[in-house]
Image (tube, helix red, strand yellow):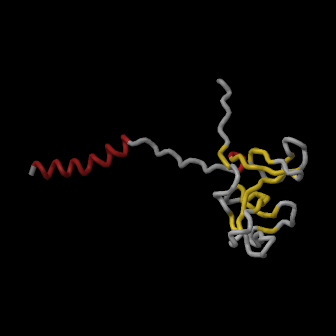
Amino acid sequence: MISLGLACAAAVLLPVIWSVSRSDPLPPPRPPTLPDTELDWRCERGHVFLAAGQVGRRLCSMCDQLASPMTYYACPVQTHGPFRVEVEFTPDDDLGTRVARLRLIGRQWFSVEEGVRCPQCDRLLIYEPSKSLRMRLVQPQDTGD
């Protein structure tokens, strides 16, 4: 009888104690946005430099020519490529930003849906994250405060 009373008391008290003792859960971390990420950029003169991501092109840090973010794509034919591909971002309500257009360096822009084709065999190129240039999160600056 006593054990049944203890079990009932525990069944009533444990959820109350648990809810009082737990702290509010932390909100999930915010996923990085394009400005939080440093990308390799390539200007029209061929300079490559590291800078924060943004929608639209930016001026080269070395010659003030227009520059675009750059990455690598590969052809399914192993002997073709990899190829440098410029990327254009656009605002997106759901994700903040998304890749909108791609082009081989100095060539015509194509939508992401169309993709970029190999200049040697006209096959659709494949994104190569292992060969891509630097892309890392921007570290907050230490202001010394």
Q: Position of residue 62 (x, y in %)?
A: 86, 41
Using the image, determine if residue 123 lies above or below residue 46: below
Answer with the quarter of the image where residue 109 lies.
Answer: bottom right
Residue at the front extreme of this rendering: 79
Nearest the eye: 141 or 122: 122
- Count every numbered label the image shows and give the total: 0
Nearest the eye: 68 or 63: 63
Residue drawn at 78 percent across, 75 percent down: 122
Q: Position of residue 107 (x, y in %)?
A: 87, 64
Nearest the eye: 48 or 109: 48
Residue at the bottom extreme of this rendering: 122
Horizontally, residue 41 falls left or right of residue 144, namely right
Which part of the image, by quadrant, shows the C terminus? Answer: top right
Horizontally, residue 102 falls left or right of residue 21, namely right
Q: Position of residue 87 (x, y in %)?
A: 77, 59
Horizontally, residue 122 falls left or right of residue 131, namely right
Q: Position of residue 135 (x, y in %)?
A: 68, 49
Horizontally, residue 4 falls left or right of residue 53, namely left
Residue at the left extreme of this rendering: 1
Answer with the quarter of the image where residue 80 lies.
Answer: bottom right
Residue drawn at 66 percent across, 24 percent down: 144
Residue drawn at 15 percent across, 49 percent down: 5
